[in-house]
Amino acid sequence: MDFTQLLQNMTNGVAKGSCYALVAVGYTMVYGVLQLINFAHSDVYMLGAYFAYWPAKWMGYLPDEKGGRAQDVPLALVGLFVVGSMVACAAVGALIERAAYRPLRNSGRLAPLITAIGVSLLLEYGGQMVFGTEPRLFPTFVEAQSYDVGGVKFANTSIIIVVTAAVLMGALTLFVNHTRQGRALRAVSHSFNNARLMGINVNATITMTFMLGSSLAAVGGILVAMDQPTITPLMGLRMGLKAFVAAVLGGIGSIPGAALGGLLLGVSESVVAYWSTTYSEAVAFLILIGVLLVRPAGILGSAAREKV
Amino acid sequence: MNRLWMAVSAMALVLLGVHLTACKQSSDPAASEDIPIGVYLSLSGANADFGVTTKNGIDLAVDEINAAGGIGGKKIRVIAKDTRSKPEEAQTVAKQLATQDKVVAAIGSVESGQSIKAAPVFQEAGIPMVSPSSTNPDVTKQGDRIFRVCYLDDFQGQACADFAFKDMKATKAGLLYAADDDYSKGLAGFFRDHFRKLGGEIVAEATFQGDVSEFKDQVSAVAAKAPAVVFVPVYYSKIGLIAREFRKQGFKGPLLGGDGWESEQLVQLAGETLEGCYFGYHYDPEDSDSKVQGYIKGYREKFKKEPNSLSALGYDAVYAIKQAIELGGGASRDQITEGLRKIKGFKGVTGTFDIDENRNARKPITMLKIGGTDLKKVKVIQPGDIK
């Protein structure tokens, strides 16, 4: 067995898993509060990449068709594009919640689920109409550089992905556990009615949840587009599937669970790829089924408490 | 209950409307006075550039023929359908072309997966189909009315292996391809067999499936074995990402690909990462033949762009059908099929070729080298060169 190679695959897996985790958090937060699987979440991830793509394109940071080298985007502008995309995606998230989910708040669990699929399809196919279906080159936010540590190779983009994901997840955990709004979020997740009795604005808290999740998805979209600079309106499909599975694996509703689930999924895919790239996804998913058979609520999930 | 009935009757009305317009179209007297040719291509989606450039070549040929008075006084009418880069969609639009639009011949598609799905529909309807650039051998095996005007993947795979072994002097090669795509998988297989036959060794193989954009593990698996060349028979929308990943993981060796790399977007999507890499091409743009140069001039004037080999094959497909109508003595589905079978010594932009008994064209392949933003011809490999 070639341990360098195995280590290489694990490194790949950590980079992949960090992206899964960032997107998985959005699924898990909304589920924790509404018991709703927000299928549109992965399409907000796609929008995140496009919202950063358009301003960069308008400002001329893309190579022309002849492939002439384009300027790299200055760091200050990168920050601006990222924040802009986060704000825009937060607005989209809030809009989706207000228009598609809030009117169905009291109509059981199936109706909003179907609506979620509808919103997802709307964004995917609407995106194809508005953005065009062709693959587009994402501007160079960070010049790619590769490092070699003892035979294990990785790019600076991978490091940025892992660090950004870790920082954001840490900040989110602090926010949820140590701020008034975070406490409100936990209270609403526990019980709508009790939270309302305590004077918490339930609707505003839910909107905030959607905005938080969506802005994290935007960062995820940009990070992935930075690492793999070709974006399409359907790029959320596969990521959505992976992130959703990661959230379930880690225990849906649990934020540390989403981080753990994402990393575990990414690493197990890559480790299986050490033996076979063809079956890596199939085997990784088999492992997941195995885990869920033993722990149906996910690794960090608590057994479901029925609300009375 | 009332609402349900309203909905049902509304749907019935819509269906009736569709049916009526469909009938109206087919009984249109103008239809018999022109030659309706169906075209199905990826005009949108992941491979949109394939469809759009091929369609340009088709339009150029049709405009030339119609401007010169058509074929026997009849003008060609093109009915173009978009497959959105999906094989299943190719089958759906093929059915529309066959039953609603009543075409007498069909041209499509670029991607072999689409052509293989659509071919049985045309075969069953008795419509001759000419694929401009589907190279997988199975395409023309779908029926005796299915033709093509390009070379085949067994030849393309062998030619690439030959080029890698003899010209690039590589004895160790890696493979990276899409396991669920007819074109990619087929081409990889032909390369593997011939490269081994020549005495080379395939040191690493990695595959991916579905519409992925992340290739870290696949690239790691191949790069770890340090092959002298990596054969990556994928389409242009993927090769940029794969090449970037290879360079990120520090692999500096050349990549080699088939005709699927060809696109105006290739250099843009890949940046500098494909510098010094090679791929197979369908024609030789430096050919001084007046037909080739006339085509290049006409294309530049009409589209204000440089033509490529996909547009050249679309162009040739139209002229092959024109010749078939002349050889077959008319523009019915059967006459065109007969005419296509008789084509010998067809002089096209992509070379002079016969349609053989398996309805395939025997043609040379041109290997191009990517340097900066330019593509440079390095070698032309004839079918007879492969032993």
Image (spheres, grey):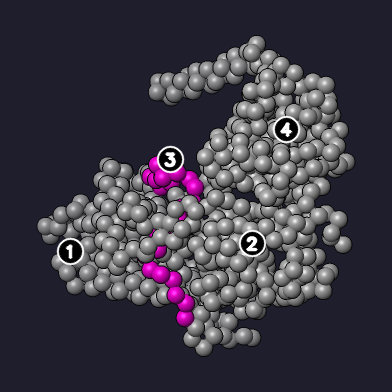
Q: Sequence order check: which comes first, mark 2 or mark 4?
A: 4
Residue A302 pos. (x, y %): 36, 70
Residue at 29% in and 59% down? A81
Residue at 75% in and 56% down? B380
Compared to residue B131, the image places residue B386 above or below, namely below
Which quadrant of the structure image shows residue B315?
A: top right
| Farthest residue, direction left | A199
Give A150 or B212, whichever is nearer the viewer. Answer: A150
**Amino acid on which the number 1 mark rests in the picture:** Gln
Badge nearest the viewer, 4 or 3: 4
**Amino acid on which the number 2 mark rests in the picture:** Lys
Badge nearest the viewer, 2 or 3: 2
Residue B319 bears which disc, if any?
4
**Disc 3 marks which residue?**
A129
The reply to whether label 2 and label 1 mark residues of one chain is no
The reply to whether label 2 and label 3 mark residues of one chain is no
Per the image, label 2 sits on a secondary structure element best described as strand
Q: Do the residues under discs 2 and 4 have CB atoms within 8 angstroms? A: no
With A270 as the anchor, is B169 left or right in this view? right
Q: Do the residues under discs 2 and 3 have CB atoms within 8 angstroms? A: no
Give B48 or B150, whichever is nearer the viewer. Answer: B150
